Image (cartoon, rainbow, N blue to C red):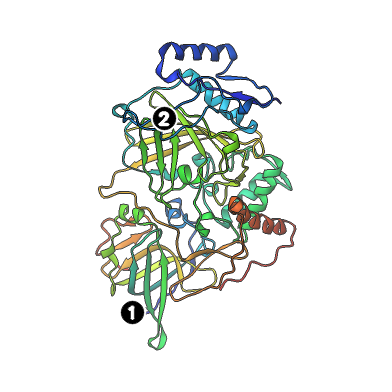
Amino acid sequence: MKRLINVALAGTLSLATLPALAHHSASMFEPVKTVTVSGTVKEFQYTNPHAWLIVEVPGSGGSLTTWSFEMGELSFLTRAGIHKQDFTPGTKVTITGHPMKDGRTAGSFTKAVRSDGEVFTARGKVAGSVNQPNE
Amino acid sequence: MAALHLKEPGSLRSSGPALSAWGLIALLLGWSGVAPAQPGADATPAPGADIMIRSSVAGSTPWAEPGPSTAVPKWAQQSYRIYLQMKARANGGANRDADHMPDWSGLWTVDGSQGFTWDGPAVDRLARGLGPKSAQALLDHCWKGDTPEFPCKGWLLAALTPQYALRFREKLAAVTRDIEWDPLSDCLPPGFPRGALLDPFGRELIVTPKETWMTSQTLNDIRRIYTDGRGHTPIDESYPLWDGDSIGFWDGDTLVVHTLYVLSHVEMQRLQPSLSDEASFVERIKMTGPDTIEDDATIYDPLALRQPWHSVIRFVRQSSPHNHVNMYACDPNVYQTAQGGTDIILPGGSVTMKREYRDPSDVQEIGVDKVIEYGAKVLKGEAPKAPARP
């Protein structure tokens, strides 16, 4: 899958996404920028106080870069309809998040689009998103 | 001002005539149960005020003996007086049994419109957020030059004293440079009122005749509100607590609560002002709908506030079928940096940390003070550039 990284201004975080960042200071993340990467799910750490979605992103020359995205606590995720089976290892996915300020390959999760068209945001699974064009 | 000795007749909960007598006394005094103190009066037991809490098993020994003292420190007397006035108006409070308690079962969260503020929807959406942009907005709106303007309409409604306004300004200035204190980043509890009233995480409200628990899944924190008739912890046995010392009574279906002895400094959130260890709280908590509870809460703090700071915190009951409270500890990969900020260890990463001795009773103060110190330098233009991250 072609590596895709796109950093853009995306406005301030909505209050709805803030619970994901409320367990600790979020000062390590860029609050107004976003990064988007496409790759393969390596691991979905389905745990509290934060779930982490870890993906391997292919680069030039066949190299792989590991990207880690911090998500909210599991009670938020389950209420939002995000479950363990949604991101099993090997799943192809495009993820958007607020990147680390220091350039490390991680971010605060805002959105994921699976290769089957299912869309997940910090608010939860987007109803009826299956079969929508991938971003 | 002379110290006041606050007494609460111990037999009121079981006697109708006594309840009426207390109400009458309250009216005659202008408010309930307060008489001018004599020197050393705080240590003098109030006749009849000793409340023994016994097991329901005959012959068993008391599991708690709160003792006669219901005195509170001078700094908490304003809020305690108001609490006792409420209690007098409620004729001492309802004596409820387990079959006649309000149904507050289920999983609750703070309404999302609250953001991370005491003021909630009464202030700008940006003021309810976190991070440098919100910090800068508060700095821009709540000071004219170096002069604080609190209450800061639309942004922060606390009437901060000059000392605490300066402290807040320094705190905000640090946040604009990504330096901010958060106890959760250091594996410490959120504390009251943040944990019980402001954090947006799952919680249960366990109501029994003698105690109500406001639980939070963050560190399994339990705020206990005693409604068994006891007074506050005696002054000479009191010490700062993460969730404070809370007593209450039932006014119909409303739980009325008085809280003090909250751990200093009271850090309500990363972009809220600090309170002092002289903060006390009066709350009236009741259901306002099938799935809503409102906490009409007021903060009193003679050091931090020129006038009480009021809010109505709204809780909403979650209805998803598999919801339940899961205790969790702090994030093992989040840590407080030496510079006073917060950082995170990613998979495959590592960090070397130096830990220094911290007085347990000042553990939060130390963390906050580091931020304040940095913020003061920011305001003076003396702050070093934001520290490099690993």
Q: Which mark is residue B5?
A: none
Res A1 label: 1
B325 or A69: nearer the viewer: B325
Residue type indicated by callout 2:
Ile
Q: Which mark is residue B53?
A: 2
The residue located at (33%, 71%) in the rendering is A43
User: What is the total number of numbered labels drawn onto the structure image?
Assistant: 2
Q: Please tell me in which quadrant of the rendered image residue B389 appears.
A: bottom right
Q: Residues within 10 Å of mark 2 (few under 14, many from 20)?
A: some
- The chain that hosts pointer 1 is A
The amino acid sitting under disc 1 is: Met
Q: Secondary structure at mark 2?
A: loop
**Could you say where residue B39 lies in the image, as x and y percent from the top left?**
69, 25
What chain letter is assigned to the residue under label 2? B
In the rendering, at what x and y percent does residue B187 appear? 49, 58
Give the residue at the far front of this rendering.
B59
Is B164 placed above or below B302 here?
below
Identify the image quadrant of the N terminus of chain B: top right
Could you tell whether A47 is left or right of B381 in the image?
left
The quarter of the rendered structure image containing the C terminus of chain B is: bottom right
Determine if marks 1 and 2 fall on one subunit.
no
The quarter of the displayed image where residue A49 is located: bottom left
